[in-house]
Amino acid sequence: MTSSRTVKDWRDEEFDTIIDVRSPDEFADDHIPGAINLPVLSNEERVEVGTLYSQVSPFRARVVGAALVSRNIGVHIADSLAEKPGGWKPLIYCWRGGQRSQSMTEVLSQIGWRVCRLEGGYKTYRNKVMSELKSQLASFSPLIVQGATGTGKTRLLQACREAGEQVLDLEGLAEHRGSVLGGIPGRNQPSQRLFESRIWSALKALDLERPVLVEAESSKVGEVHVPTELWKKMKVAPRVEITLSMEERVALLLEEYAHWTQTPDALIAKLKPLRYRLGNELVQSWIDLIEAKDWSVFVKALLEAHYDRAYTTASNRREGKRWPPILVPARDKHAHADVLTPLRAVLQELSN
């Protein structure tokens, strides 16, 4: 039979499959990029075993846990792993490289597969990510792209990326557009850990000796926080502003946030908490426009009374060098792509 080995870094070798044997909830919270989840304990089973350990006895917990783990490993072998060839080489990990990964490793190695186990488990991965993220950010040089709500900053960054420029898309990584109405239908935000892992992975693909375009954000994007060291750099980074006419901004927002016009009750529910900060009369005026389905007037009113004021206040707090604003002639993607020429001049100046 083939014996198993341990590795200290999941990147030390090439593996056919990386298997996370933690519970689905643990996997969803964060995991090694590319890993698949074959849990040896379900979410409910993990709670059951933990409760037995703390409230009954460690021995009883081990008995029940062993039965559950054995059954679940058997299901995975008969199902997800049934067609794996003899030379298959997986890497197995759990939370700390303990009993869950050891159990899976032992059984799979006895079959004859070339099994490796990650020493220290997910904690090894997490520690390396945070250490490397700190090093990445030490040499990170962002150029902040700012602009009032609806100027199409995301469209501009997409055009920049398609043209080969370096972009760190925090809103894309956070799966949120960064405002009270910024949730994306049908998509949940990542956990804080997973958000940080995504940033680390995105930075790995960039040349950090060159400037990187980053959209202006607050310290939070939805419910996740921008890592402290990244936020510090963003606050003092050089910045360039894009502008777009109010008419085009309103049209752009109605395109990109069409889901709110289709669910007016949900939109009103999102706006009501703003009464405590902005006053009942102002928020009620927005609600009246929503109920009348006067969407263009509503969006313009929301921009002028809330978003533009917040943008001006936040922009005035930033310390970095500023270039003259760049006017985007229209809201379409081609118009945003036209902004690449003056933006590249700024990038070139920063690179010199």
Image (cartoon, rainbow, N blue to C red):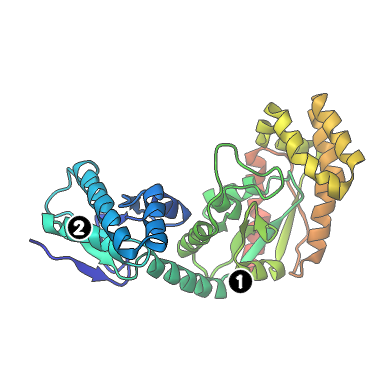
The reply to whether residue 139 is visible in this rendering is no
Q: Secondary structure at mark 2?
A: loop
**Camera-side residue of 242 and 93:** 93
**Labelled disc at residue 172:** none
Picture quarter containing residue 301?
A: top right
Give residue 234's position: percent from left, percent from top: 67, 66
Q: Is residue 10 left or right of residue 345?
A: left
**Quadrant in the picture for the C terminus:** bottom right
Mark number for residue 89?
Answer: 2
Residue at the spot x=73%, y=29% of the render? Answer: 264
> What is the x, y in percent for residue 35?
35, 54
Looking at this view, is 147 or 350 the one in front? 147
For image coordinates 57% across by 52% down, the residue present is 174
Q: How many marks?
A: 2
Say whether residue 239 is left or right of residue 279.
Answer: left
Q: Label 1: few (<14), some or many (≥20) within 10 Å?
A: few
Foreground residue, 77 or 321? 77
Q: Residue at x 57, y 48 (%)?
A: 175
Q: Earlier in the sequence, mark 1 or mark 2?
A: 2
Q: Residue furthest front?
A: 56
Q: Is residue 305 among the parts visible in the rendering?
A: yes
Query: Residue under circle 1?
Result: 229
Q: Where is residue 124 shown, x and y percent of the image?
A: 38, 70
> Three-letter amino acid code at disc 2?
Lys
Q: Residue furthest right?
A: 281
Which residue is rendered at x = 50% and y = 69% of the image?
133
The answer to whether 91 is drawn above or below residue 179 in the figure is: below
User: Of the residues shown, which amino acid type is indicated by label 1?
Assistant: Glu
Q: Can you say whether 151 is above or below 325 in the image?
A: above
